[in-house]
Structure formats: C-alpha cells, structure tokens
Amino acid sequence: MKNYTITVNGTVYDVTVEEGTGAASAPAAAAPKAAPKAAPKAAAPSGAQGSVKVNAPMPGKILSVKASAGQAVKKGEVLLILEAMKMENEVVAPQDGTVASINVAAGDSVEAGAVLATLN
C-alpha cells in the first residue's frame, strides 16, 4: 500500500492506493481533510420582477438608464443605452407595458443574455 496526499481545487485528500494483481477490486475511498466550501449564491436583484424580460443582446457596458420602475412605456421606446464594440446600442421595450424593475445601473458590465429590465 502507498499513501499519497493530493490537492484538488484547494481541497486536500489523503489517498491510500493498494497495488493489485490486475483483477478488478473495490476502489479505495478518499477521505477529505476539509469539507469543500459551497459556492456563494448570486444576489437577487431588488424589486418585483415583471413577466416580460428584457435581455442584453450582446456583452457590453451600460452607459445610461432611460426608464425607471413604474414608468409606462410603448413598444420600441428606449429603456437603456448599451455600449458594445465602441458603439452605442439602444435597448428598447419589446412591447407596451409598465417597467417592473431595472436590474442594472450606469457603468455596469453585462454579459449577453443578462436580464437588464422586466416589464408587466
């Protein structure tokens, strides 16, 4: 038998390896010294969420927010300005409704598909 100490993603394991004859045998169990830490949960955006989500069409930076929660908007009205690839892109309302929440602020970096705002 040989004993090894192995570190995987910052977690240390003591492993005992038994030399076999080539026949299948039960694998040795690894006993962790420290329990792995759970990943932190993402913070939920504040405010009530609406039924219609307005997603970022591409990754970029929010330059300005043109709408506010509770504001009535028409289809095509500008909600936010998103800078991507040195261009300013207008993020517009996909339908008539009321802005339920704005989930970003000016200066925030966003990934493609991130929920920027919701409408009712």
Image: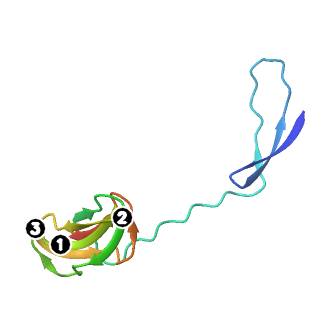
Q: CA distance from mark 2 to mark 1?
A: 17 Å
Contact, CB < 8 Å: mark 1 with mark 3? no
Contact, CB < 8 Å: mark 2 with mark 1? no
Circle 1 is placed at which residue position?
78
Circle 3 is placed at which residue position?
75
> In this rendering, would 47 be left or right of 18?
left
> In this rendering, would 41 be left or right of 77?
right
Q: CA distance from mark 2 to mark 3?
A: 23 Å
Element type at mark 2: strand
Q: Quadrant of the C terminus?
A: bottom left
Q: CA distance from mark 1 to mark 3?
A: 9 Å
Q: Earlier in the sequence, mark 2 or mark 3?
A: 2
Circle 2 is placed at which residue position?
60
Instruction: Give the residue displayed 19% in from the left and 82% down from the top.
Output: 70
Residue 79 location in percent, x, y?
21, 73
Q: Nearer the viewer, residue 100 or 16?
A: 100
The colouring scheme, among rainbow, by chain, secondary structure or one colour, is rainbow
